[in-house]
């Protein structure tokens, strides 16, 4: 008896090329998915770090950065800011000439009635004052309560006023930082 050799099955060239193209397309798709997931993970890590800094009271905004203001006698300068969360505003100033007629005031607008378009003012420092005055340098710290997480704030909700009750114009270098 003669032995019969098993028949070899040969894959056609077009089937091999088609399978190769499918493998390349799948590999490119996998690389794209991995790249997209890496970007999403990076974005989420950034958001987690941002939230951690807020929870640990380490987030800070600078509202004035050593800005120079000239205030004439019996005048004041006001500026409005937005406090996204509750925190502390630190006001530091240097006055030339060093006279004691400078005062500051900080007011919050708080929305007590969710249906109202008119927020109620809440005076943080109801009597214009300076807490700590040393020669021509002053420093104050104001606690700020913000309802922004519950009522999104579109407009500024903090007003800072600095005035001059003295008899001559003064120049104030002012820095205000808000930590939350």
Image (cartoon, rainbow, N blue to C red):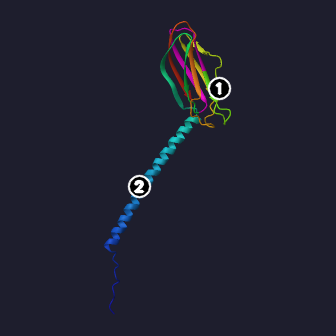
Q: Give the quarter of the image for residue 122.
A: top right
Q: Considering depth in this image, is 38 or 95 the residue closer to the camera?
A: 95
Q: Which residues are magenta?
A: 85-105
Q: Residues within 10 Å of mark 1 (few under 14, many from 20)?
A: some
- Tell me the quarter of the image containing the C terminus: top right
Count residues near mark 2 (Cα–Cα under 10 Å), then give few for <14, some for 14-19, many for 20+: few
Residue at the extreme left of the image, as rendered: 13
Note whether 89 is above or below 22 in the view shown. Answer: above
Instruction: Tell me if I can see residue 144 in this picture.
Output: no
Secondary element under disc 1, as helix, strand or loop, is: strand
Magenta stretch, overall SS? strand
Mark 2, residue position: 31
Which residue does the image show at 46% across and 49% down from the upper left? 38
Residue placed under numbered mark 1 in the picture: 121
Q: Is residue 15 left or right of residue 140?
A: left
Residue 102 inside the magenta-drawn segment: yes
Magenta stretch holds residue 164: no
């Amino acid at each position: 008896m003669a032995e019969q050799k098993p028949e070899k099955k040969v894959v056609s060239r077009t089937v091999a090329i088609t399978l190769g193209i499918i493998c390349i397309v799948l590999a490119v798709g996998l690389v794209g998915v991995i790249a997209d997931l890496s970007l999403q993970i990076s974005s989420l890590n950034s958001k987690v770090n941002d939230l951690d800094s807020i929870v640990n009271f380490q987030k800070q905004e600078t509202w004035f950065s050593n800005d120079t203001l000239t205030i004439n006698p019996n005048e004041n300068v006001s500026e409005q800011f937005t406090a996204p969360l509750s925190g502390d505003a630190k006001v530091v100033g240097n006055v030339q000439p060093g006279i004691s007629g400078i005062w500051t005031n900080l007011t919050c607008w708080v929305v007590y009635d969710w249906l109202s378009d008119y927020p109620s003012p809440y005076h943080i420092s109801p009597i214009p004052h300076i807490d700590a005055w040393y020669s021509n340098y002053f420093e104050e710290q104001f606690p700020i309560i913000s309802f922004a997480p519950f009522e999104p704030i579109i407009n500024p909700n903090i007003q800072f006023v600095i005035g001059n009750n003295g008899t001559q114009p003064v120049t104030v270098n002012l820095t205000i930082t808000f930590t939350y």
